[in-house]
Amino acid sequence: MLARRAPNATTAARQASGLHLIGDLHGCHHGGALMHDAAALEAFCRQQVLSAGLTPVGHLFHGFEEGGGVTGVVVLAESHLSVHTWPETGYVTLDVYVCNYSADNRAKAQALFDGIVAAFGPHKQTVHCIERG
């Protein structure tokens, strides 16, 4: 009987690879309700997740005092989406991390990220793209 060999570190890292997109969006004065309405941002983000072909498994969105921003997260079977808004300054931070355990989900991660960025219409953005694993 042959013994099964444990996967080496390189194989394990490759299986758990993924794409992590981190955005700082400035001058988001076109986001409307998405900037300050937790329910609106939640519905929009959940719709974007589904449109990108990803799998939501949980979510939590919180609106701050009247006129304040929203912080929210959608937990994905593939990893997560988080977004934080500051309507008083037109600033949004966006974080999309999607693992590629059983399939290459990079295009889905990019589609999700791009769809959310487009809705906020930033005047200026800084994006960091990190290959994980």
Image: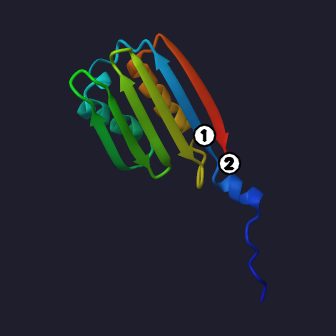
Residue at the spot 39% in from the left edge and 41% down from the top edge: 73
Mark with earlier residue (2, 1) = 1
The foreground one among 3 and 34 is 34
Residue marked by disc 2: 133
Residue at the spot 39% in from the left edge and 43% down from the top edge: 74
Residue at the spot 38% in from the left edge and 15% down from the top edge: 90
User: In the orientation shown, which residue stands out farthest toward the bottom?
Assistant: 1
| Tag 1 secondary structure | strand
Identify the disc placed on residue 19.
Answer: 1
The foreground one among 53 and 37 is 37
User: In the orientation shown, which residue stands out farthest toward the front?
Assistant: 65
Three-letter amino acid code at the position of disc 2: Gly
Q: Position of residue 92 (x, y in %)?
A: 42, 23
User: In the orientation shown, which residue stands out farthest toward the left?
Assistant: 66
Q: Position of residue 8 (x, y in %)?
A: 77, 64
Residue at the spot 41% in from the left edge and 32% down from the top edge: 83
Three-letter amino acid code at the position of disc 1: Leu
From what the image shows, is residue 102 above or below residue 112?
A: below
State which quadrant residue 67 falls in: top left
The foreground one among 43 and 72 is 72
How many numbered markers are drawn?
A: 2
| Tag 2 secondary structure | loop
